[in-house]
Amino acid sequence: MEILELYCDLLLARFGLIQSMKELDSGLAESVSTLIWAAPRLQSEVAELKIVADQLCAKYSKEYGKLCRTNQIGTVNDRLMHKLSVEAPPKILVERYLIEIAKNYNVPYEPDSVVMVTDGFTCSSSVARGSPVQILGAALHTTHQARLW
């Protein structure tokens, strides 16, 4: 949501430019396309975002809106797409978080050995017994697309 807030602030600051130009300024393309892409995914939480996206589509064309919603033009913010994706996080990342949570609250937890072995670590490895920073660092390191939420 922070990314969207920054993009909204940028569009508000450049509102005069948006009104005066018929074509989309290249400096605003990522902001506009990201807002249009995110609107259907967040419309239940931020109804105003759909209204803004509809207005941007009316300004720059319905075809442009369709291209943004499918990211066919490639200008939607990658980080936001990752954060709003419907894909489940990698199993190893979930397992590492569960290990860390169990350690913080002194709850006995036996990690899924299949997931741990598949990743190349066993439950008795030094990483599994490491500090919270080591555990989360190892999970992020071993998971190529993982990002802290």
Image (cartoon, grey):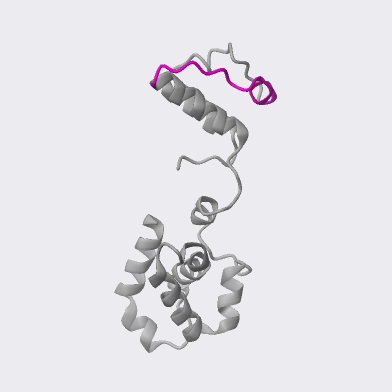
Residue 90 in the image: state x and y as whole percent: 61, 37
Task: Determine whether 49 is above or below 21 in the image.
Answer: above
Q: Relative to 59, is 64 on the left or the right? A: right
- Residue 1 covered by magenta stretch: no
Q: Which residue is drawn at 60% across and 30% down?
A: 92
Image quadrant holding the C terminus, namely top left
Check the image and report above or below for 114 versus 12. above
The residue nearer to you, when weighing 137 against 123, is: 123
Determine whether, in the image, residue 8 is placed left or right of residue 145. Answer: left
Q: Which of 26 and 129 is in front in this view?
A: 129
Residue at left 47%, top 79%? 54
Quadrant in the picture for the N terminus: bottom left
Residue at 49% x, 66% y: name it: 34
**Quadrant assignment, res 120:** top right
The vertical placement of 125 against 62, above or below, is above
- Name the spot of residue 93 as percent of width and height, x first: 56, 33
- Residue 75 higher or lower than 138, as above or below: below
Residue drawn at point x = 40 percent, y = 62 percent: 4
What x and y, as percent, mark residue 104? 39, 21
What segment is highlighted magenta in the picture? 105-118
